[in-house]
Amino acid sequence: MKILLIVCPFIFLAGFVDSVAGGGGLISIPAYLSAGLPVHLAAGTNKFSACCGVTAASVKYLREGKVYLPIALWSALGCICGAAMGTRLALYLDEKVLRMIMLCAIPLTAVFVLTRKNMGGDDSLPIDMSAKKRAVISVFIGLTVGVYDGLIGPGTGTFLILGYTSFLGIDLLKASGCAKVSNLASNLTSVALYALSGQILYSVAIPAAICSMVGNYCGARYAVKGGSAKVRKIMLVVLVLLFAKIIFDLAA
């Protein structure tokens, strides 16, 4: 019960943030770790709850017509392959090594996001290119980010949004919608592998999943109503969390 009191409020917040701009893992993973779960068990439990939450957000974005389905589906295919590779690697890595990878990856994520000044506005249109080229780029984005998601996790949605806006010219809101569909594919893959390895604590994961679903749904509503401007604001919040976490880890 004590673990749930620590975890659930943060999982709701993580779901809200993640459904808008990605980066929910920056909140949820530290919450699981602070509750005393080992790294691999925390990662698996987080994937389970996140997967349920992303499903809720994906449904909301799809209903509102804020997803470019061809891009999202090709990217999802890449995410499945990438997540499988990344998750298997994470399960074989030593716990200390995994912590060090997370420690290095988070500030790099923050620096990359900070250098992206123009990330697409509400009036952005997909870059003019053939359907085949768009599909190849979408798969590559999904594959690359899928490996990262399976191995580390935090910032996955943000990376997907960056990929869609930078290489395909999608506006922030629809990029966020595509990111949810693709992220759902990678999460399902990771959950299956973590479950087979016995790295999910269901007594915590199921209540957390409910909180994640509510948080993701509320966040998706917030994004759809506010457009790209609100997505940008939440991304700035994610940046603050990125830097706060790395400073905390260095001081620990």
Image (spheres, helix red, strand yellow):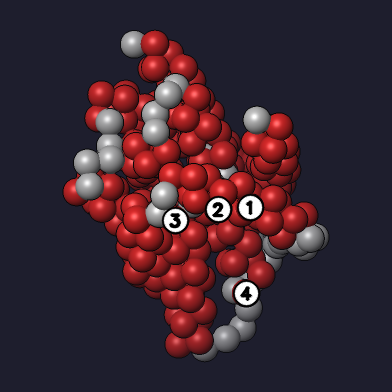
Query: Which residue type carries mark 1?
Result: Cys
User: Which of disc 3 and disc 4 is earlier in sequence?
Assistant: 3
Which residue corresponds to the image point at 51% horizontal and 41% vertical from the top-left? 25
Q: Position of residue 184 (x, y in %)?
A: 37, 52
CA–CA distance in space, label 3 to label 2: 9 Å
On the image, numbered disc 4 is attached to which residue? 167
Q: Where is the C terminus found, in terms of image quarters?
A: top right
CA–CA distance in space, label 3 to label 1: 13 Å
On the image, numbered disc 3 is attached to which residue? 151
Query: Which residue type carries mark 3?
Result: Leu
Tell me the quarter of the picture where residue 93 sits.
Answer: bottom left
- Determine whether label 3 and label 2 are within 8 Å by CB: yes
Q: Which mark is residue 101?
A: 2
- Above or below residue 201? Residue 153 is below
Q: Which residue is at the front of the view, 219 or 156?
A: 156
Q: Is residue 225 left or right of residue 119?
A: left
